[in-house]
Amino acid sequence: MKNNFDAIIIGAGLNGLTTAAYLAKAGHRVLVLEARQALGGTAVTEELAPGVLCDTLVGNLTGFDPRIARELGLSGVEFIGADPSVHALQPDGAGLTLWRDVGKTAEGLRPFSARDADKWGAFVERVARVSGFMEALYAATPPRPNEVKSESLWTLGSLGLKLRGLGKTDLYEALRMLPIAIADWMDEWFENETLKGVLAAGGVTALMQGPLATGTTLNFMHRQVYGGGVIRPTRYVRGGIGKLADALANVVRARGGEIRQGERVVRITLKDDMATGVVLQNGEELAARRIGSSADPHTTFLDLVGAYELDAEFVRAVRTIKYRGANVKLNFLLDGLPTFHNTDPSLLRGTIAVNPTVTALERAYDDAKYGSVSENPYLEFTIPTLADSSRAPEGKHVMSAWLQYAPYTLKTGDWRPETERVREKALGILSRYAPGIESRVLESQVLTPCDLQETYHLREGCLTQGAVMLDQFFFMRPVPGWAQYQTPIANLYLCGGGAHPGGGVAGAAGRNAAREMGKG
Amino acid sequence: MLRHTPFHSRTAPLCEGQNWRRWAGYLAAGSYELTHEREYWAIRNAAALLDVTPLYKYVVQGPDAARVLNHIMTRDIAKCAVGQVMYTPWCDDDGKVLDDGTVHRRAEDLFFVTSADPNYLWFCENAQGMRVTIEDVSDATAALSLQGPNSRKILNRLAAGILDGLGYFRTTPMQLRELPTVISRTGYTGDLGYEIWTENQYAEPLWDALMQAGEDYGITPMGILALDVARIEAGLILIETDYTSARRARIEGQKSSPYEINLGWTVNLDKGNFIGKRALAQHKKRGSDWQFVGLDVDWVALENVYAQEGLHPAVAGPAWRQSTPVYADDKWVGYGSSGCWSPILKKYIVLAHIQAPYNEIGTNLNLEVTVEHKRKQAAATVVKTPFYDPARKKK
């Protein structure tokens, strides 16, 4: 073996790069190995057509801990907080809009429900307080429940509460609220079906669960963490989300770290239950004192380490992690901006939700539960070129849509014949609001859950390296007993979304993991 | 509803005392006669025939079969030659014994495994992603155990080949008359003996053939009561009697590592990773407080204890299986888990779990004996097992 590194990081997604950047900054000699050519993992910007930049998968960076940018001194990253954050299209043409400004949103809600409009401010405040509590939790290494004194969990909680001036009531409210089905939580607050629907859609984002499932409020709140108090925030990175990965990569390189792209790790080498290095697909062996894997737990433990080297119970736990991707991603290049029911284009700068209602979401889920793409899927899309004209030539627009639900495992067993059908289905739905939209499509890209797994290494098409569910949360992530970024293999750490606090909160797991890897 | 083994049509009419026991969901004869004694003596002096169909049996097959079993078992299965049988326990992650049984390598990539408890799910779970198929053949495989000094002669009468060359813990396919069987030189009696494995359809003719061929050699159908005495003499451990499977233990203290039950010799820490290895390495380093040892109870002391109540020692009969305290002076140092009067040794013997430092060979201890409802103690000495180990077992 050659090239002794202090740390090898597997995977150059935002978490892997964050870990690498923190370690490099602390003086460690770091090597990052990325199987793909592009950096960013799920936060990748690629060309949809020559001169057209598209955030292939995730384009909306809802949560990003501002400390990461500050601590690492990221440069060249400009966030665009879209306003409105969400606009919900309705069949009757009366769109419902969530603005960044609380009062403006409330006023907009008044024609739909005066009662809901009155409650909006209190709702925003409640979300902000609970997400504040969660932010403290997300930046912490989870305790081992069986090893800590009984108060520690509460101490940890109260630490966060103190820092943010929150009280016990907020903690109790968080504990009460997070396990609730988002549909029920919405009923506690609101009466308007579209408002409830657009918020409930946030509870099932990237999740193979309907809004009636328990714990979907957690998933909603997960997307509020580091969201700056904006409900269902939409945040772009100017020039594409890939700029964030570039900025992190620049920190790594500036601190003497090395990033090798197109280098797939096929095995983690062990000696006496300790990780010693990695083997690349080309057979090259590289040694390091520590290995941080931002690959998902299944890949890390069962493919790279191997079940043979691990305890049976641990293997069982890793095998039963639920991934269950729920989405197809569709990217379109349009030769002009479509008109949606005469909606003012200024309302389309954020996320556009297509007629969200709790009932429709649950019905859409019902089909997927039994292995089919939803008969009437839910669509949510963005037109980032409205907020960031640098991404495409003038007059052209990128439309980037998530279709839900699309199970990874189809009962027919084969995704290939579905791909074109899903594209037509999505355009069919959109054309009800924007007739003739099909004729505006210059390029289209359809990424099924299988594509997400094959091309982007997202197991079962899951965007968060394990579904964000209560039983896969905090000290139970990735598996109970191993939520401290360490693994049963000494010197091997998890630093990706498979670890606490999960995917979808850019860099949070990576930052926590770097802290643990830097110890001792 | 307890099930009948494929030998039931033969065993049932012979079971005069209707002394049936439960064994893994099957009806198993406790003894055929009213007492087990003649059946016991058949093991030691002639040949005894036991229906061991209730054992759980698995076929593990495929290019990774050895690798999978090596990952599950504590012994180094890679070293098991084709035609060899290995006795081995297997453990959970904490190195606590789940079960024990035999692994028979019938071909390079074909193994036959026996166990006391169901293990299908455990084996499958730990074989995921490996090129192997695991089949539970428990219900499809009939099995007989033929034990005793005459067992080889009886088999040679029936076998297409000669069994003289089949070594201890070796196995071979063998046609007995026209019946296809696999024979292993294994058993649970510490005597010369064989186990015969075949498909259910051949069960009845196999029984008939053996009984017929064994007539001149004193073949005697044997129940599990006689077996129990023989296996204690042989110092062989019995699950749920001498140790609690880690699957069934209700508290940590009820679980045992192989080192605590005299099975340390089966743990190979030099092979690759296997389930429980990390914990077992720690156990070994730490040493174990408990040892599974033999106790030879002093006959004169026992007589005295009974004489105090005007009785003679009442120790004949079947082996006992209840936890019985053992003391060093008045300090509790462990417990006997099974014991019996050994008819061949003329000794009262006990298999016991004893704490250090009282488990050294030759240590004088006291076994609790209840006589006329009163707890008393009889002197006993820690001895090596097996208590009885005839040279013919391995010859």
Image (cartoon, coloured by chain):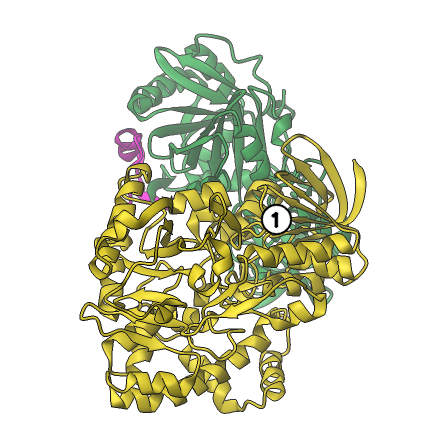
Name which residue type carries label 1: Gly
| The chain coloured yellow in the image | A
Q: Is residue A399 left or right of residue A10?
A: left
| Whether residue B393 is situated above or below residue A212 in the rendered picture | above
Label 1 is found on which chain of the structure?
Answer: A
Q: Quadrant of residue B210?
A: top left
Q: Colour of chain B?
A: green
* Image quadrant in which the C terminus of chain A is located: bottom right
Span shown in magenta? B1-22
- Residue A153: % across, % down: 59, 78
Residue at the spot x=61%, y=88% of the render?
A: A162
| Whether residue B378 is situated above or below residue B57 in the rendered picture | below
- Residue A328: % across, % down: 36, 51
Residue at the spot x=19%, y=67% of the render?
A: A91
User: Does the magenta run of residues contain B11?
Assistant: yes
* Residue matched to label 1: A11
Whether residue B371 is visible to the viewer of this picture, yes or no, is no
Marks counted in the figure total: 1
